[in-house]
Each structure stands twice: as C-alpha cells, then as structure tokens.
Image (spheres, grey):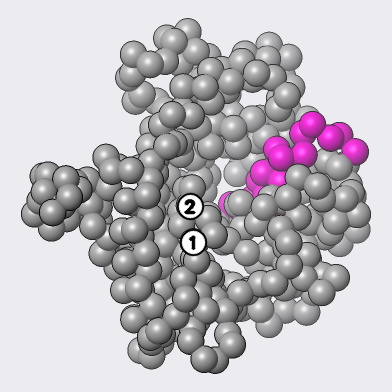
Amino acid sequence: MSPDDTADGHGPPGVVPFAKVSRKTQQKRLRLAARRALDRFGIGEARLRMINFDFNATFRVEPTGNGQRFALRLNVNSRRDRRAVTTEATWVSALAEVPGIMVPLPQATPEGELAVDVRCDGLDRPIPCVLYTWLDGPDLGSSASRRRVREIGRLAARLHDHAESWAQPPSISFKSIDDVMLGEPDNLSSLDSPSFDPSDTSVILEALASVQRAVDGVFRRGSPHPIHADLHLWNTKWVDDHLAVFDFDDAGLGRPIQDLAISAFYLRDDPQSERALLDGYAAERPVPEHSPAEWEALIAGRNLLLLNDLVASVTAGSHDFVARYFGRTAVRMRHYLRHQRFRLDLE
C-alpha cells in the first residue's frame, strides 16, 4: 500500500482526506469517481480525458464505438447539491429548444435523472455530476474580438428573455443569489489566518460590506429570475459561426445586471470590449437599470467571490496561490473604496 491508502481521513477508513493529497492523486480519485458516474448514466467503456480541474473537474468522454462525445462535470468544490444541479440541467434543456441560443444538451440516466451523486475517496460528501453533449469549437478566452464580445451581450439578453417568461417545472428550485457569494457560504467574514495581513483582511471586509449594499439595492428593483451567474469568455465557445454557452453550475435567482457585471469583470482592462458587451445586450433588450456605483460594486464583487472560492478550495495547488491573490485583491479593493472604481490591472 502507498501512504495515500493508509492514513486516517474522510471516506473509507484509512484514506487520506482529499484536500491533503497531491494533485496527481486527486486526479486519479476523480477519474474513479467519473467512472462511477458514467455507470449511472449507462455508459460503459469510454475514453476519459480530464480537460479542466480547478474549481470543479470536467472530463471529455468518448464512449467506445459510437462516435459520440460528452462533457462530464464533477462538482468538486461547488457546494451545489444534486437537486441544484438537476435544476440547472432542467433549465439548460429548456434553453436548448430556444432559437438563437446554443447550449450543450443534458443527458439523463436510464431512470430519467439529469444529475447523480457519486462517491470520491477522501471527501466526506457525495459529488453531484452532470453529463452534457460535447461542444466543438474554441473557448472565446482572452483573445475574443469585440464582435464576439458583443455576441455575449446579445446572448445574455436572450437568456434573460427566456428566463422571464419560462414556466418552471414545480419539481425544481433555484436558490436565490442575492448576496455577493451567490448563495454560497461566506468564507471571508470568518477568515482567521496568520498568512494574511490584518490590514488587508480589514479592507476586503469593508469592500464586501460595500458591495453587499449595492447588491441589496439591485434586488429591491423588480423580481429575480434565473440567470447564468458565470457568463464569461471561458464559458462560451464559437461553434459553427455561432456563440454557445455552457457551465450553468452557478445559475440561480438573480438580476440580469449581475450577469452583465460578471462578464464585464473579465473585460475591465479593455473599456471598448466592455462597451461592446453592453451594446450587444442593448441590441436585444434594454440594459437593466443601474447606477455607476452599483456597476462598479458588482464588478468588484466578482473579485471577492473568486477569493471566497479560493480560500475554501480543496484542489491541490490552489492554496499556493491564495496568499498572492489575497494581497492582490486587497490592493484592488483599496482602490475601489477610495475611488469607487474597480481596476483589474492592480497588483
């Protein structure tokens, strides 16, 4: 036996906790969990390739002999449970029927389930998994043209149009994302680590309170409806000259301006692209009401959410980055609080 098999930890007796093993061992465990998930979806022999392992893990699945390809997502760090993942997949299934919206198609188990729970060695909770058809084409990424960024705005508007009129099945339930952490636990307010400068912690918490006040103001206007809540360049693909969107794991009951601010966070170094995003949205429907201060706060809130996820991550290697990202976030939040303007290019 290797040391990985003999120490105390979560899961089966004698297994080291997932957060304490190497990245390579984590990947091996997730591959085994992925095989368990595929069994539940009725897929036997298949080639698995891990294409992403950061917050969650995604495998490309190529079943033997049939030429199909799928994307299998395992919610490693996400605290969304199976019902939430089923809710996500149900909405994506409905969106797949809408002209002008391209999404991967969720796959069901032989029993008709859109999401399954599987065990992963070393974790003290089951991992919800969802299987989608594979989308060919490159992620837009950081090299997206302004024309394609404009298409993200148009797509966001179409998602919001659908969500406002969609009759949700009574069997599903979106959680409210009326806070900075999008309904997930707040890991920053209770943070107590000698690794972080107390003055940095103080400014981050001050910024968190400021952003939450802005979110509260946004939610006082109108009624929330499902939004993507993670609509950025790396969750979109260019497929056959059309924009496709995927990874609805963060979807919840929110306000449309939140989606736009999340997209804008990744464009903040390029004001013309940020403008193109809003112009694309306006070509389909009016940009939601908001003040300049609310816009800046919502963009700053994305930085705080990413930090919140990072400090609680069990993914090997993530903690090596935490201290640097914490300090970088503090610099950005000092500037935001002083000037009411969020800048991404500050270190």
Which amino acid, mark 2?
Phe
Q: Secondary structure at mark 1?
A: strand
* Distance of label 2 from label 1 (alpha carbons): 7 Å
- The reply to whether residue 276 is in sight is yes
Is 323 left or right of 290, judged from the image as shown? left
Of residues 284 and 23, which is closer to you in this image? Answer: 23
Residue 86, quarter of picture: bottom left
Mark 2 touches mark 1? (CB < 8 Å): yes
Q: Which residue lies at the image location 90% right of the left edge and 38% below the top edge?
A: 272
Image position, residue 292 (x, y; %) = 78, 30
Q: Which residue lies at the image location 59% right of the left edge and 32% below the top edge?
A: 303
User: Callout 2 environment at 10 Å: few (<14), some (14 to 19), or many (20+)?
Assistant: some
Secondary structure, magenta segment, majority class: helix
Image position, residue 321 (x, y; %) = 48, 29
Is 184 left or right of 100, judged from the image as shown? left
Of residues 135 and 222, which is closer to you in this image? Answer: 135
Q: Which residue lies at the image location 46% right of the left edge and 22% below the top edge?
A: 323
Q: Secondary structure at mark 2?
A: strand
What residue is shown with label 2?
53
**Residue 267 sits inside the magenta stretch:** yes
What residue is shown with label 1?
50
Magenta stretch in the rendered image: 254-272
